[in-house]
Image (cartoon, coloured by chain):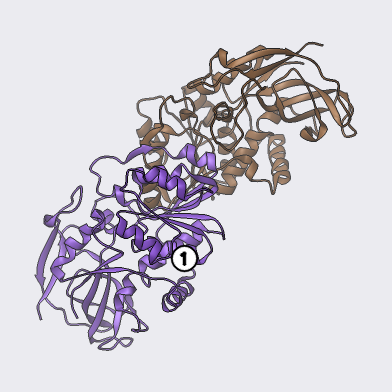
Chain colours: A brown, B purple
């Protein structure tokens, strides 16, 4: 069996080009005691990975030069030397970008059911869904009748944020780029309003969509888009800060209006978070999300590219807006 | 008896000049039923008043054109037609800038003890002390051994923040302007470190003063000073945002690094607040502050200017750094 991995070849500014990703042929390692040999099926690419490519202090460890990237992967057990997993089991975990992975069984989680498509365990039933759930409910705390705005609203996290907010009885406004995505928000996902940030009348459209102001802004994008959102915060607004994708590939500083006076005027709360900090009720949250998906209450769009060689391209699409919903790469059957 | 008031003559940008304050002779009004006639003794000037001079949505109502300014005042009852107050009582409340004030007794609070100087009811025993207490303890939540940084640290709020943080066992770093204020922090107030933001080596001095990073930053100043502070936030840092005095008189926008990526990296919480939102335990908080003051555990510096005509000058000193500690104006014996 031929094995292959993708390693970080160099650090970069801007959108990572091909020379950042180096493909290497490697051995397939026999599993030792408690280890399994996995075949990668679906590889997830997520915006937070951009920060890990830099050599800076962040909430997750930087990727090391000449070491493989890693991230969430759905894989199949092809050989097991571990008591808890057998051949044919499907698992998920934070795993290296390799076609075949030999790893201790404790680093993966068995996927309980295969009634839903496996790639959903990288989106609504995986990290992005949990991020939406925890950030919205633990920090945003939307109340019935309140107005919730979410940016990158058709994305893996944003789409779930908006749908949960609807389930909680909020007036939900999604911001996305392009009419296809905006229509998807209102027609498929059931958002109350969709706004296209690429249009010249974005500021006016936003103002019109939030006649009662904004109680919760789920931040995925940052930059000038969010500066505009901040003008409409209500008293005691909450801003879970999940991401700032517009800033990740900036070559200079991310400059704009400072936030302090805005926060004081609205007595607003703004909190950066990562999903891993909410570990108390992960089981209940997972069950709740699975139930909503099964009942059709939460829909999830996934863009699937094919081929291990397509991972860098798929990653770049996160920053150019060329994907739709959750971006995954199918690397094996 | 001659009476006089100060009204808002015009809106302005920048530091309010004399033409913003108009002095007017007015009548002394006889107190009706439930009313008292008060003589103003100490008038408080506070940074938040700058925002009220603008015609914009804020947490407190804008001052109206041609109407008197108002703010915290300590006053003496000179005539009473109210059952709860008698001549000679000392009261405090949010009152118009007038030498004599006729008002329903329900709008003022009797000062219980006169064992401490009356002006302390405008500083550590008044709104600034309560602001420090609530913002630090309800949002900042300093734990023993954590590092607390406070800006405008020799001011009415900042000085109390730092002293309470010390009482809670934190490592306390104060930022102030000029060596006199900085020495006051460490020598009189017992801060661990004082840093002069006016010095060229501010960034290096700050870095040296927080070897373990920053867990709580009590924000009073904003601007480039705070941009520097944000570089040192620890994981789960808390930032009570009380003020942004460096920005209040800006004629353009307040531009600097956007905060989103900083908050995500540190999973930090930033919350704008005003003291009035914490109304649950005001009585206990007041008693605690009074006890600390009586025990000498919290010290309070006050700059007292004299004369009703000095109010505008004293107000401007808040923004030029020419005052020391809490700024009040004594307008009568």
Vertically, is B43 above or below B174? below
Residue A267 percent coordinates (x, y): 42, 53
Residue A49: give x, y in percent of width and height.
59, 28
Tag 1 residue: B164
Residue A151 coordinates in the image, percent (x, y): 49, 34
Decide which of A199, B10 is in the foreground and name it: B10
Q: For this view, does B47 lie left or right of residue B261? A: left
How many residues crowd mark 1 within 10 Å: few (<14), some (14–19), many (20+)? many
SS at mark 1? helix
In this image, A280 relative to B320: left or right?
right
The residue located at (33%, 86%) in the rendering is: B84
In which quadrant of the rendered image does the C terminus of chain B lie?
bottom left
* Viewer can see residue B201: yes
Tally of marks: 1
Q: Position of residue B104 (x, y in %)?
A: 28, 78
Residue A307 can be seen in this image:
no
Residue name at image x 14 percent, y 56 percent? B20
The reply, left or right, for residue A70 in relation to residue A16 is: right
Chain letter belonging to callout 1: B
Image quarter for residue A296? top right
Which residue is depicted at the point 36% across and 67% down? Answer: B127
Quarter of the figure that contains the N terminus of chain B: bottom left
Residue B113, located in which quarter of the rendered image? bottom left
- Of A109 and A207, nearer the camera is A109
Point 25% across, 64% down: residue? B45
């Amino acid at each position: 069996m031929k094995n292959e991995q993708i390693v970080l070849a160099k650090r970069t500014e801007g959108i990572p080009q091909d020379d950042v990703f180096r493909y290497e042929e490697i051995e397939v390692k026999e599993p030792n005691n408690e280890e399994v040999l996995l075949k990668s099926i679906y590889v997830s690419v997520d915006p937070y990975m951009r920060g890990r490519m830099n050599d800076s202090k962040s909430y997750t460890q930087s990727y090391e030069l000449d070491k493989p990237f890693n991230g969430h992967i759905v894989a199949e057990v092809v050989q097991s030397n571990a008591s808890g997993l057998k051949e044919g089991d499907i698992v998920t975990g934070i795993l290296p970008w390799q076609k075949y992975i030999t790893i201790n069984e404790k680093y993966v989680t068995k996927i309980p059911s295969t009634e839903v498509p496996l790639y959903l365990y990288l989106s609504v039933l995986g990290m992005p869904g949990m991020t939406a759930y925890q950030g919205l409910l633990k920090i945003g705390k939307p109340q019935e009748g309140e107005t919730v705005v979410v940016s990158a609203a058709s994305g893996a996290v944003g789409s779930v944020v908006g749908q949960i907010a609807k389930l909680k009885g909020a007036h939900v406004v999604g911001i996305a780029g392009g009419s296809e995505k905006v229509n998807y928000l209102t027609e498929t996902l059931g958002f109350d309003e969709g706004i296209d940030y690429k249009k010249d009348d974005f500021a006016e459209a936003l103002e019109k969509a939030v006649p009662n102001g904004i109680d919760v802004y789920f931040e995925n994008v940052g930059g000038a888009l969010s500066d505009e959102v901040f003008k409409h915060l209500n008293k005691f607004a909450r801003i879970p800060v999940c991401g700032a994708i517009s800033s990740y590939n900036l070559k200079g500083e991310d400059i704009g209006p400072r936030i302090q006076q805005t926060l004081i005027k609205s007595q607003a709360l703004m909190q950066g978070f990562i999903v891993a900090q909410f570990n108390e009720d992960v089981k209940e949250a997972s069950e709740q999300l699975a139930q909503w998906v099964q009942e059709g209450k939460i829909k999830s769009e996934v863009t699937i590219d094919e081929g291990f060689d397509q991972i860098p391209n798929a990653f770049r699409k996160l920053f150019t807006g060329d994907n739709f919903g959750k971006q995954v790469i199918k690397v094996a059957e």
